[in-house]
């Protein structure tokens, strides 16, 4: 298949996606669709300038013809780039494509020393706390140190009878995690972490459940340390 045919196929896929994403699209030019969709879709926003340039190339291919022959044949780089963008837009990578996600949990009644030992041995910085099927909070290293700080005036901190629930009560920020499902886009993971940073806050983890809700069965945990492999899949 000629590059021009591949290019037009990918362009048409993107244009149909934009028309679905934008209300009353019939009177809008392609570039207007891009501008409008960019406010709602971070992938469109990321490639907005590329898409506008591709619109000019598409016009040259489709409209400016002599004797039914195209006068602009896209090179391999442009063709492969628009096909890659079309794939990211129409069939974006999903969370389920991440091969390995931790699923370690504890209950509120577990001893705190059990949590500390698990964090040390498993190199965890946070552990989801469930009471049966109910999510009770995210135990983080920061919340443990905050609890310890409350007892800093004591010469010895005795962990013998301390439970996880006591530390959760001292947590400074209970809004430190989000829930998504396996079919959510990987781009949403990036947006959630970046969005909290822009607000001057920190998102400790995204909990992946079968329903995308706190009441769902936990499938895995994504942290900021997973971003490099997620961004690689989005390249």
Image (cartoon, helix red, strand yellow):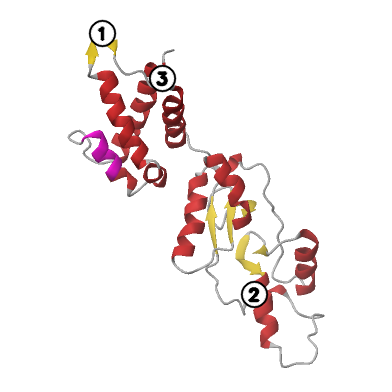
Q: Image point 41% across, 27% down: which residue?
A: 78
**Residue in view at x 51 percent, y 52 percent:** 190
Taking the magenta stretch, the answer to whether it contains residue 58 is: no
Side (left or right) of 141 relative to 214 = right
Query: Foreground mark, 3 or 1?
Result: 1
> Quadrant of the rendered structure where residue 177 is?
bottom right
Q: Position of residue 121 (x, y in %)?
A: 81, 62
> Residue 143, which numbered label?
2
Q: State how far apart marks 2 and 1 are (Cα).
A: 69 Å
Relative to 105, does residue 54 appear above or below in the rendering? Answer: above
Q: Nearer the viewer, mark 2 or mark 3?
A: 3
For the record, the magenta segment spans: 29-35
Contact flag, marks 2 and 1 (Cβ < 8 Å): no
Q: Position of residue 9 (x, y in %)?
A: 38, 22
Q: Nearer the viewer, residue 210 or 22?
A: 22
What residue did someone put label 1 on? 68
């Amino acid at each position: 298949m000629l590059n021009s045919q591949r290019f037009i196929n990918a362009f048409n896929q993107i244009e149909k996606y934009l028309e679905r994403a934008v209300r009353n699209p019939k009177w809008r030019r392609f570039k207007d669709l891009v501008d409008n969709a960019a406010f709602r879709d971070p992938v469109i926003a990321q490639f907005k300038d590329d898409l506008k340039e591709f619109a000019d190339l598409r016009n040259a291919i489709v409209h400016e013809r002599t004797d039914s022959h195209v006068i602009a044949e896209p090179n391999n780089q442009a063709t492969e780039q628009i096909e890659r963008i079309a794939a990211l837009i129409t069939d974006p990578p999903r969370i389920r494509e991440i091969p390995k996600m931790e699923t370690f949990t504890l209950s509120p009644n577990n001893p705190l020393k059990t949590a500390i030992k698990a964090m040390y041995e498993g190199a965890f910085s946070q552990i989801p706390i469930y009471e049966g099927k109910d999510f009770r909070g995210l135990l983080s290293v920061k919340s443990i140190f905050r609890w310890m700080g409350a007892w800093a005036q004591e010469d010895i901190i005795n962990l013998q009878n301390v439970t996880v629930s006591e530390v959760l009560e001292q947590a400074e920020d209970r809004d430190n995690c989000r829930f998504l499902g396996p079919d959510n886009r990987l781009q949403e993971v990036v947006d959630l972490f970046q969005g909290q940073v822009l607000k001057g806050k920190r998102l400790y983890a995204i909990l992946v459940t079968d329903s995308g809700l706190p009441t769902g069965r936990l499938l895995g945990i994504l942290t900021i340390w997973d971003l490099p492999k997620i961004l690689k899949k989005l390249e």
